[in-house]
Amino acid sequence: MPEQNNSTLLLQAIDLKKHYPVKKGMFAPERLVKALDGVSFDLERGKTLAVVGESGCGKSTLGRLLTMIETPTEGQLYWQGQDLLKHDPQAQKLRRQKIQIVFQNPYGSLNPRKKISQILEEPLQINTALSRAERKEKSLEMMAKVGLKTEHYDRYPHMFSGGQRQRIAIARGLMLDPDVLIADEPVSALDVSVRAQVLNLMMDLQQDMGLSYVFISHDLSVVEHIADEVMVMYLGRCVEKASKEDLFANPRHPYTQALLSATPRLNPEDRRERIKLTGELPSPLNPPPGCAFNARCRRRFETCTQFQPRLKAYNNQQIACFAVDQDEGQKLP
């Protein structure tokens, strides 16, 4: 059962999994791709949880499960104690209103045949009983909040820059007054000069509207700017989870250390010794035995190739690594 003693706790995911059956040929046996394999987290009101990792680690799959674009294979998802995975109209309505998503590509996520007015008002038309005048008023109000002008109301997406399109996508995500916004790589397709503007906009909206974010990214310099808590994923599993301050000051999992060592730093004193990962990300169709990271890990030893580590709490961090267990004097399998 979910925790209910914390009044600020909005969203709680427990052991979420998403497995895809795959067949390579007519007579080949069916195999499973474990895109997400047991991820849990708590999200509090007004906070940002950043989900980071390489391509293929399951970040975007998690975003699609949270918004119910896809249904989890296993696991639980609660909204202030209410089960969001129940098959009833009330749970579905709650999901649509409380959890929205902003996609990565602002050029592909907006319908080129619809005006901005239609794009913004469609969620209101489907989910509310507002009149046409009320929908227009709310759309113009939201456009102003994200830095768009009134004259943009009747224009088409192709008439805007990438940064403006992402502002439109953010406005669309906020039309139903959600409490949680899933941001799936929202600035990765934008020019560097525009990224800071969009990130600052998101932080201002969070403060003004009390929003919570699940911020999916591979760019740790962006994460350091916006996150409160960071969850590092590798091949469908969480390998380290901590507050932003703890994780950036003292990364303990070898994978997290390698990611942070590759993050550019302007201040020479903040730069870390570069840790180069050898080898490729394993195929989720054929993951290695034991720890999924063992083939690329500089601290690998025999136990890592035989058993899968579980998340354990050390001070304010949760880490899934036998090398860390060994450092802490824990008994190994």
Image (cartoon, rainbow, N blue to C red):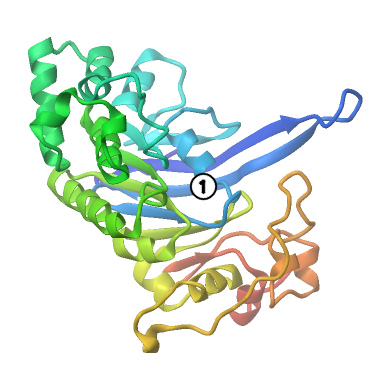
Residue at 14%, 33% (x, y): give it.
Answer: 142
Mark 1 residue type: Lys
Say what secondary structure mark 1 lies in.
helix
Residue 280 x %, y %:
71, 60
Q: Is residue 98 visible?
A: no
Q: Is residue 302 above or below residue 131?
A: below
Q: Is residue 2 visible?
A: yes
Drawn side of residue 73 relative to residue 145, left or right:
right
| Spot occupied by residue 41 in the image (x, y as percentages of width and height) | 44, 49
Q: Residue furthest right?
A: 27
Residue drawn at 51 percent across, 73 percent down? 262
Judge left or right: residue 301 versus residue 236: right
Front-most of 205 and 91? Answer: 205
For the view shown, which residue lies furthest in the bottom direction? 269
The quadrant of the picture occupied by the C terminus is: bottom right
The residue lying at 26 percent from left, 16 percent from top is 127
Residue 4 location (% of width, % of height): 33, 42
Q: Mark 1 packing: few (<14 Cα in 10 Å), some, or many (20+)? A: many
Residue 138 position by quadrant: top left
Residue drawn 26% across the image and 33% down it: 159
Q: Residue 81's quadrant in the figure? A: top left
Residue 93's quadrant in the figure?
Answer: top left
Vertical position of residue 312 compared to residue 100: above or below: below
| Residue 30 x %, y % | 82, 30
Q: Quadrant of the N terminus?
A: top left
Question: Which residue matches tag 1?
Answer: 59
